[in-house]
Image (cartoon, grey):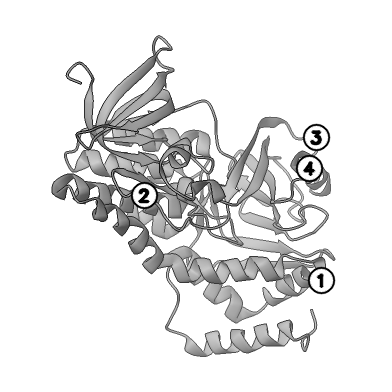
């Protein structure tokens, strides 16, 4: 293999997870190749919490909006405003955010190439022969040798399917959104550039939710569902009519699968590790993925760096262990919330009604913005527990 280019690690996929992993590995001195398809933008509301901005040094100029509240809309059109106290939620547009992350990885020493992953095979020396289609050059297949591979190539990851047992069982919601030109003088009841609107209505999504999220000069209008017979474009068309944005200029339309639950295994036990959507780290119920993808990319880089130093494949297991220790409980709780409260319009009505509660609002925003379960107000947790029980038993009115 002397005539084949070699790397310490190849990262497949240049979204938030892959770009973060490549940047961290390169900054630590590893020889890294980052492969990015570069012709598709993932549908995404674009919300990022302050914790992400701080932990990953995101410059203010990448924020296209700073959100001060969210509004929940029930099946009966009840509207509950949830103001964010003493902080904000940043909004990014993925057509600029992702390329910036890749450029940062490149500036730190990663070799970034426009390419499509094709296949990998294990070599007798313990390394991997990885083949990709060169989209930035002559369009030919190119093979490289690497000691480790990070698959960050999305929910339908080719790396995962070729390497990690059980990856084909990853359940997904189909997400679809349209980026449209934001109106200059919109009626704020329909659209507010400082507010995220989340629509919990079965007519728009039978098992998830729809959204209208501001992106500065633009806004994202989207929906998700796991139902195979569901028409996301039709639902978005209806929502655009509802918020009087049906005549707004459409900038682009995007659709992609969004994972529902983390995989039980993220590595192949040899030299391949998954990160981001490829291993399912999208929060149930909320669909939030950017923060968890970037954290997953960082943990994958740490695990691979340890593997490169020790040669012990068990080091790859630490990425999932650390992630689930930090956020496994939250994912479990959100999974229960989604399965129960999103199942019927009657339950959605009660769920939105609960969002009026000051305890719910405080704990929701604290958990979202800081990515930690709040322990400082145990009485608030107790009150919410008993309110949840009352709702579940039908003892409380919506």
Packing grade of label 4 (10 A; few <14, some 14-19, many >=20) is some
Residue holding disc 1: 346
* Residue 127 visible to the viewer: yes
Nearer to the camera, 89 or 11: 11
- Viewed as shown, does residue 352 lie left or right of 384? right
3D distance between C-alphas at marks 1 and 3? 32 Å
Query: Considering only order in the chain, which callout, 3 or 1, is on the residue closer to the N terminus?
Result: 3
Packing grade of label 1 (10 A; few <14, some 14-19, many >=20) is some
Identity of the residue drawn at 77% across and 86% down: 396
Residue holding disc 4: 231
Query: Considering only order in the chain, which callout, 2 or 1, is on the residue closer to the N terminus?
Result: 2
Residue holding disc 2: 267
Image height check: is 332 above or below 134? below
Residue holding disc 3: 247
Q: Which quadrant would residue 248 be assigned to in this image?
A: top right
Image height check: is 62 above or below 169? above
- Viewed as shown, does residue 246 lie left or right of 47? right
Identity of the residue drawn at 70% across and 56% down: 209
Query: Considering only order in the chain, which callout, 4 or 2, is on the residue closer to the N terminus?
Result: 4
Image height check: is 35 above or below 240? above
3D distance between C-alphas at marks 1 and 2? 41 Å
SS state under label 3: loop
Marks 4,3: beta carbons within 8 A: no
Nearer to the camera, 221 or 348: 348
SS state under label 4: loop
């Amino acid at each position: 293999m002397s005539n084949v280019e070699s790397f310490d690690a190849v990262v497949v996929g240049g979204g938030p997870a892959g770009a973060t992993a490549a940047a961290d590995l390169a900054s630590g001195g590893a020889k890294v190749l980052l492969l990015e398809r570069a012709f598709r933008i993932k549908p995404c509301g674009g919300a990022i919490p302050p914790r992400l901005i701080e932990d990953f040094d995101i410059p203010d100029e990448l924020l296209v909006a700073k959100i001060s509240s969210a509004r929940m809309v029930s099946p009966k059109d009840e509207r509950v405003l949830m103001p964010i106290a003493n902080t904000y939620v940043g909004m990014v547009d993925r057509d600029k955010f992702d390329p910036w992350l890749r450029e940062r990885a490149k500036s730190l020493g990663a070799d970034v190439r426009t390419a499509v992953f094709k296949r990998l095979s294990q070599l007798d020396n313990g390394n991997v022969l990885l083949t990709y289609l060169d989209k930035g050059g002559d369009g030919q297949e190119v093979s490289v040798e690497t000691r480790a591979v990070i698959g960050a190539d999305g929910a339908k990851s080719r790396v995962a399917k070729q390497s990690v047992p059980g990856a084909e069982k990853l359940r997904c919601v189909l997400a679809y959104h349209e980026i449209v030109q934001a109106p200059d003088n919109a009626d704020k009841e329909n659209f507010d550039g400082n507010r995220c609107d989340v629509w919990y209505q079965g007519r728009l999504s039978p098992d998830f939710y729809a959204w209208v999220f501001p992106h500065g000069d633009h806004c994202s209008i989207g929906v998700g569902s796991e139902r195979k017979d569901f028409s996301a474009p039709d639902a978005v068309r209806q929502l655009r009519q509802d918020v009087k944005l049906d005549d707004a200029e459409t900038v682009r339309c995007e659709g992609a699968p969004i994972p529902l639950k983390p995989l039980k295994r993220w590595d192949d036990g040899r030299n391949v590790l998954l990160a981001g959507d490829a291993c399912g780290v999208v929060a149930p119920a909320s669909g939030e993925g950017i923060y968890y993808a970037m954290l997953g990319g960082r943990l994958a880089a740490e695990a691979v760096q340890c593997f490169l130093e020790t040669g012990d494949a068990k080091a790859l297991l630490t990425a999932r262990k650390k992630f689930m220790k930090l956020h496994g409980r939250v994912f479990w709780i959100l999974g229960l919330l989604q399965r129960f409260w999103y199942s019927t319009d009657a339950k959605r009505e009660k769920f939105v009604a609960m969002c009026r509660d000051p305890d719910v609002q405080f704990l929701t925003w604290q958990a979202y913005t800081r990515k930690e379960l709040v322990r400082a107000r145990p009485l608030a947790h107790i009150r919410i527990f008993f309110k949840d029980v009352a709702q579940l038993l039908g003892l409380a009115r919506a």
